[in-house]
């Protein structure tokens, strides 16, 4: 496991803030809401009109202002890698071809600061944070024009940072677009449109854009490694009924259809059939381009598993759940890694895994033994997968510090090793406090990397 990337992740739309020096992203206009937010991340409805309200992503946890202090803490934690997203909306403030030098300079500073602490920077080009102007002017990835805009954006940032950034990730959880068309695809449905047809068109363009990043990186520097993140949610059939098994297979395909194209370089037969059904033309030159530009590694997030049945998907009653109802299934991670490697045979980087729950500050300390237990069990299963022979190149937790949660927009659903004093209503000092898990992970990294060269 020499030079294994023990690290953590954050994303611009959830931590940066710095709202006045950039243009808006898709998540900036979606308010908090434990039961409701996700529906707006799929279709924003009235929020496209930007009514007054509290919008947590506009402030994040002010990483933009605090990046030096935050990265110093990541250095103290001993991270070997940090994954973060560049905000496209900071680099191109609007539909202009001229990049914003101030934005480019910010990520120069972030990268240089990480390198100062020997932390490998890993860039995600879009992490649920597409610029709003791309949605408003072009309707996101529904429109092929967005692939062109994306190409211009990634050429700009890869040229600028490739001398210091080796690992690039095109998109965060491409398959989450199945449920969050607006947040992941940047696309808003018009009345009467067929959701599945629109989704498949977005998928086609996103897959093309993914190949654009691969080509851009490899043209600029052959040593660069490119991945795309998929949400790795394994399914079990609810019962031994062949119907439930069939349902499970259908659910799995909704995820693997993306990975199949990006890694194998061609549309699998079941995806070709779907595309035909929605009358989406698979153009010869695009297919050739995708075949020639496949991923070097798969980036995967793992939080939970799910059950498939003829009544839809549901949670597994055999498993415990988090305070937010997510099932806890460490073993599912070993199985998922094995199945993924057996199918694709390319290296896998775990780019997100973590426990989102409430934390309590007691006399200035956070005793999050529950998080330590969660992470330890998952790491144990990942290490078993490595013993099985799966080529895992890194393990990055979600998240290095507390950030705004995606599903609910809440601060109190915390994932970090570093507590951030900010409440759900935006109040708080923003003070950073190291949790018990901070010292546990610091120790684990030291232990696991003591023989690294
Ligand atoms: C992943 C996302 O889906 O899960 C992150 O890439 C997100 O952005 C993380 O924060 C945890 O999900 P949530 O909804 O609890 O924040």
Image (cartoon, rainbow, N blue to C red):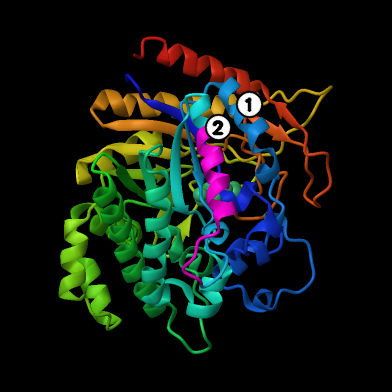
Q: Cβ of disc 1 within 8 Å of ligand 1?
A: no
Q: In the rendering, which numbered label is found on residue 113?
A: 2
Tell me which residue sits at (62%, 26%) in the image.
72
Q: Are marks 1 and 2 in contact (CB under 8 Å)?
A: no
Tell me which residue sits at (57%, 24%) in the image.
75
Rendered location of residue 351, percent (x, y): 44, 40
Rendered location of residue 104, percent (x, y): 53, 51
Q: Looking at the magenta stretch, what is its main secondary structure?
A: helix
Q: Nearer the viewer, residue 309 or 13?
A: 13
Start-end of magenta stretch: 96-113
On screen, residue 273 versus residue 115, left or right, reads left
Q: How many marks?
A: 2
In the structure shown, which secondary structural element does the residue marked by tag 2 occupy?
A: helix
On screen, residue 58 versus residue 240, left or right, reads right
According to the image, label 1 marks what residue? 73
Rendered location of residue 78, percent (x, y): 53, 21
Magenta-colored stretch includes residue 108: yes
Up the image or down, 451 lies above or below 332; here it is above
Rendered location of residue 89, percent (x, y): 56, 61
Q: Quadrant of residue 438?
A: top right
């Amino acid at each position: 496991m020499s030079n294994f990337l023990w690290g953590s992740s954050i994303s611009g739309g959830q931590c940066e803030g710095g709202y006045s020096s950039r243009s808006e992203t898709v998540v900036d206009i979606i308010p908090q809401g434990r039961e409701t937010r996700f529906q707006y991340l799929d279709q924003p409805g009235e929020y496209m009109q930007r009514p007054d309200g509290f919008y947590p992503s506009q402030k994040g946890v002010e990483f933009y202002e605090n990046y030096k202090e935050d990265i110093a803490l990541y250095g103290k934690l001993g991270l070997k890698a940090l994954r973060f997203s560049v905000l496209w909306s900071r680099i191109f403030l609007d539909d202009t071809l001229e990049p914003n030098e101030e934005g480019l300079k910010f990520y120069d500073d972030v990268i240089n600061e990480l390198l100062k602490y020997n932390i490998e920077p890993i860039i995600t080009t879009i992490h649920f944070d597409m610029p709003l102007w791309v949605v408003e002017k072009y309707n996101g990835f529904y429109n092929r024009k967005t692939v062109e805009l994306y190409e211009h954006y990634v050429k700009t940032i890869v040229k600028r940072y490739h001398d210091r950034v080796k690992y690039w990730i095109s998109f965060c959880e491409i398959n989450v677009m199945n449920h969050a068309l607006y947040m992941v695809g940047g696309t808003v449905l018009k009345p009467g449109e067929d959701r599945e047809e629109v989704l498949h068109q977005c998928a086609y363009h996103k897959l093309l854009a993914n190949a654009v990043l691969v080509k851009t990186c490899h043209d600029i520097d052959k040593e660069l490694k490119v991945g795309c993140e998929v949400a790795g949610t394994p399914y079990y059939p609810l019962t031994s009924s062949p119907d439930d098994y069939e349902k499970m297979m259908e659910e799995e395909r909704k995820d693997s259809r993306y990975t199949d194209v990006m890694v194998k370089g061609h549309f699998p037969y079941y995806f070709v059939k779907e595309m035909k059904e929605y009358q989406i033309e698979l153009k010869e030159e695009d297919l050739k381009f995708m075949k020639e530009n496949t991923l070097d590694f798969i980036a995967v997030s793992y939080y939970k598993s799910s059950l498939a049945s003829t009544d839809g998907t549901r949670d597994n009653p055999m498993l415990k759940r988090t305070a937010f109802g997510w099932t806890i299934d460490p073993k599912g991670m070993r199985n998922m890694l094995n199945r993924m490697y057996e199918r694709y045979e390319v290296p896998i980087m775990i780019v997100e895994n973590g426990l989102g729950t409430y934390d309590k500050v007691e006399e200035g300390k956070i005793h999050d033994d529950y998080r330590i237990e969660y992470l330890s069990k998952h790491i144990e299963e990942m290490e078993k997968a490595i013993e099985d022979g799966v080529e895992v190149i890194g393990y990055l937790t979600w998240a290095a510090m507390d950030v705004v949660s995606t599903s609910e927009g809440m601060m109190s659903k915390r994932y970090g090793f570093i507590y951030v004093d900010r409440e759900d209503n935006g109040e708080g000092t923003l003070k950073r406090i190291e949790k018990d898990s901070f010292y546990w992970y610091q120790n684990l990294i030291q232990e696991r990397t003591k023989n690294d060269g």
